[in-house]
Image (cartoon, rainbow, N blue to C red):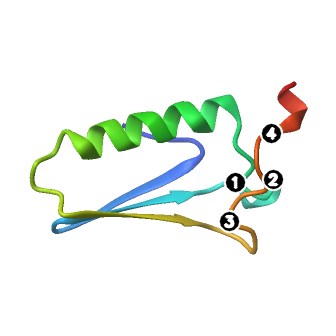
Amino acid sequence: MEYRNLLYERDDRYVTITLNRPERRNCLSSEMLGELEDAFRTTGGDGDVAGVVLAANGPVFSSGHDLAEM
């Protein structure tokens, strides 16, 4: 699946999921949370995956929920 707010990379038996909204300090929008759920479900359903790294682009891992959506 293509994601707008995440980067999903698989390297052999390891997956890296990267939050990719650095211009918004990787705040967690409803769309991003849905993408994260999909990415983790996809990864969890793959018995060949040995580990997952959750990373973020930019200077901030995540500023929390996207309050602009409230």
- The residue wearing badge 2 is 24
Which residue lies most toward the left here? 48
Q: Position of residue 44 (x, y in %)?
A: 25, 43
- In this picture, is 67 found above or below 56? above
**Which residue: 60% across, 46% down?**
5
Q: Which is closer to the viewer, label 3 or label 1?
A: 3
Provide the residue designation for mark 4.
Answer: 66
Work out how far the residue at label 2 is from the one at label 1, CA to CA, in angstroms. Answer: 6 Å
Q: In the picture shown, does residue 64 fall above or below 58?
A: above
Answer whether labels 2 and 4 touch (C-beta < 8 Å). yes
Q: How far apart, in angstroms, are the residues tagged by discs 2 and 4? A: 9 Å
What amino acid type is highlighted by mark number 4? Asp
Left or right: residue 50 versus residue 55 is: left
Q: Closer to the N terminus: mark 4 or mark 3?
A: 3
Q: Disc 3 and disc 2: Cα gap in Å?
A: 11 Å
Q: CA distance from mark 4 to mark 3?
A: 14 Å
Type of amino acid under label 3: Phe
Q: Earlier in the sequence, mark 1 or mark 4?
A: 1
Residue 55 image offset from top left, x and y in percent: 53, 66
SS at mark 2? helix
Rendered image: mark on residue 55: none
The number of numbered discs placed on residues in the rendered structure image is 4
Q: Tag 1: residue type?
A: Arg
Which circle marks residue 21 in the picture?
A: 1
